[in-house]
Image: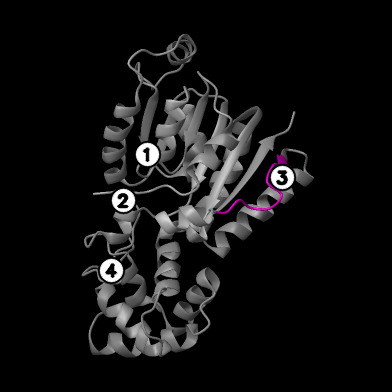
């Protein structure tokens, strides 16, 4: 089974300008697709993910990408850096909001590039146990099992006003008030503990039928963002990433919804204004028609890249 198919793979790695022996941080390792390509081009990867399932699967994938014989540049860098243990990759279970702490533990001062791929993996979206799916028997949505609050907890505890605010703020849901009202009404009848039931409630409240885009898509997105504090963690991660970049090092970010892209765009503009970064992609790079046909989930992907100034 496919764990995850990365979006904008070639474009992202090309923009990172990978050279043998350089260290890159993949802050959202996922299925390891981007990291695998970096290794194939001779780079070394610190792979971070808060999902232990992702790390297990990615480790198997990255081992298959390892060169039989490491290049002199790779071996030199590995010998000078803790954590790699004679492999071209080092995996860490953590959140990229802790980027500074992670690199300090590994005794890494500077890297050639940092990647944030903010998409939810195919495995997470389709796994019945993870509770991200419209057909799921669970309503969890935690990226990490270490988090305490689930989507079911939010749906059960938040007021109608608070639910409406989350749906509006995190996904620009036009019918946020109607949906929040319906949720509060339904939870009085019985607790909402499955993605399946929540999806039905939202569909009924919006009056929309299931089409190419499910009527509950924005509500599920908003709950996922809230459960995992995605935008708050992204802002923390970006601010910690810039000082870690070497001279001319590159920061590549793939976003999948308006809130993420706006945050990244504003961050890049502010960093350029402060003369810390130079924006490489004046407009975001989006998938070509052929990629969208092959991987429909890539349709909303946007890649923005910036470079560390001298």
Q: Nearer the viewer, residue 71 or 193?
A: 71
Q: How busy is the neighbourhood of tag 3: few (under 14 within 10 Å), some, or many (20 plus)?
A: some
Query: Which of pointers 3 and 1 indicates the residue nearer the eye?
Result: 1
Segment colored magenta: 278-286
Query: Which of pointers 4 and 1 indicates the residue nearer the eye?
Result: 1
Q: Find residue 303 and report its horizontal and vertical position in percent.
A: 58, 49
Q: Which residue is mark 4?
A: 139
Question: For the stretch drawn in magenta, what is the main secondary structure?
Answer: loop
Q: Which residue is mark 1?
A: 32
Residue at mark 2 to residue at mark 3: CA–CA distance: 32 Å
Residue at mark 2 to residue at mark 1: CA–CA distance: 21 Å
Q: Is residue 258 visible?
A: yes
Identify the residue at the far front of this view: 290
Mark 1 secondary-structure assignment = loop
Residue at mark 4 to residue at mark 2: CA–CA distance: 16 Å
Q: Which residue is mark 3?
A: 271
């Amino acid at each position: 089974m496919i764990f995850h198919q990365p979006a904008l793979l070639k474009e992202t790695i090309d923009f990172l300008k990978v050279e043998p022996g350089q260290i890159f941080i993949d802050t959202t390792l996922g299925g390891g697709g981007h990291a695998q390509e970096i290794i194939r081009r001779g780079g070394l990867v610190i792979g971070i993910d808060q999902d232990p399932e992702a790390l297990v699967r990615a480790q198997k994938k990255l081992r298959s990408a390892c060169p039989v014989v490491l290049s002199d540049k790779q071996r030199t860098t590995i010998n000078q850096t803790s954590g790699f243990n004679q492999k071209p990759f080092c995996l860490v279970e953590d959140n990229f909001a802790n980027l500074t702490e992670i690199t300090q533990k590994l005794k890494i001062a500077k890297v050639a590039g940092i990647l944030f791929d903010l998409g939810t993996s195919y495995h997470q979206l389709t796994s019945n146990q993870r509770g991200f799916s419209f057909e799921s028997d669970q309503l969890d949505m935690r990226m990490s099992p270490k988090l305490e609050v689930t989507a079911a907890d939010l749906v059960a505890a938040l007021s109608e006003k608070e639910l409406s605010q989350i749906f509006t703020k995190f996904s620009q849901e036009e019918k946020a008030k109607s949906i929040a009202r319906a949720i509060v009404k339904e939870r009085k009848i019985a607790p909402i503990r499955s993605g399946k039931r929540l999806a039905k409630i939202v569909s009924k409240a919006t009056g929309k039928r299931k089409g190419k885009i499910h009527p509950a898509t924005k509500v599920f997105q908003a709950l996922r963002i809230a459960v995992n504090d995605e935008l708050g963690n992204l802002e923390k991660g970006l601010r910690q990433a810039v000082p870690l970049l070497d001279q001319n090092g590159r920061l590549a970010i793939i976003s999948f919804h308006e809130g993420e892209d706006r945050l990244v765009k504003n961050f890049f503009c502010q960093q350029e204004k402060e003369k810390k970064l130079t924006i490489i992609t004046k407009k975001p790079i989006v998938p070509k028609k052929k990629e969208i046909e092959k991987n429909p989930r890539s349709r909303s992907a946007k890649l923005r890249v910036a470079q560390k100034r001298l």
